[in-house]
Amino acid sequence: MANCLDENYPPPIKDAAGNFIRDCVSRANIFNKYFASVFTRDDNNTPHFTQHVNPTAGCCDVSFTPLNVLKVLKVLKPKNSSGPDGFSNILL
């Protein structure tokens, strides 16, 4: 498997001037600069979101029938990766 010492992997990228950049550190810096430019910094202000659930509703107020669960399980794609619980869809 190729690594950063192989100057052709990953392939060279172009900088802002259109020059091909091959060395790993420069490529990493270009990607870092790009990703820093497209994300925002946290300003500690929480945006307002419209509430879609009754604020008095609790977990005990939600019910699932066996038919509801079966309908969802039938449309799961068995080859998808597992969720945060670690269980694969094929297991379900």
Image (cartoon, rainbow, N blue to C red):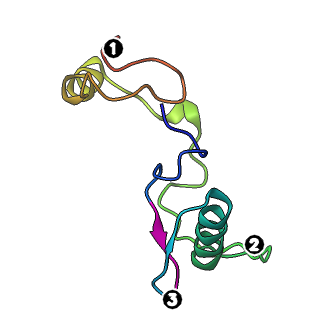
Report the amino acid beneath label 3. Answer: Ala
**Mark 1 residue crowding within 10 angstroms, few (<14) / some (14–19) / many (20+):** few
What residue is pinned by disc 3?
17
The image's mark for residue 42 is 2
Mark 3 or mark 2, which has the lower sequence index?
A: 3
Report the amino acid beneath label 2. Answer: Asp
Mark 1 or mark 3, which has the lower sequence index?
A: 3
- Helix, strand or loop under label 1: loop
Instruction: Measure the C-alpha gap from mark 3 to mark 2.
Output: 31 Å
Residue that sits furthest to the right in the current view: 44
Circles 1 and 3: CB atoms closer than 8 Å: no
What residue is pinned by disc 1?
92
Residue at 57% in and 76% down: 38
**Relative to 85, does residue 28 appear above or below in the rendering?**
below
What residue span does the magenta drawing correspond to?
Answer: 12-16
State the residue in front, 79 or 84. Answer: 79
**Mark 3 residue crowding within 10 angstroms, few (<14) / some (14–19) / many (20+):** few
Mark 1 or mark 2, which has the lower sequence index?
A: 2
Magenta stretch holds residue 21: no
**Relative to 75, does residue 9 appear above or below in the rendering?**
below
Quarter-of-image position of residue 68: top left
Quadrant of the image for the C terminus?
top left
Q: Main secondary structure of the magenta part?
A: loop
Q: Position of residue 5 (x, y in %)?
A: 60, 45
Report the amino acid beneath label 1. Answer: Leu
Residue that sits furthest to the bottom in the current view: 17
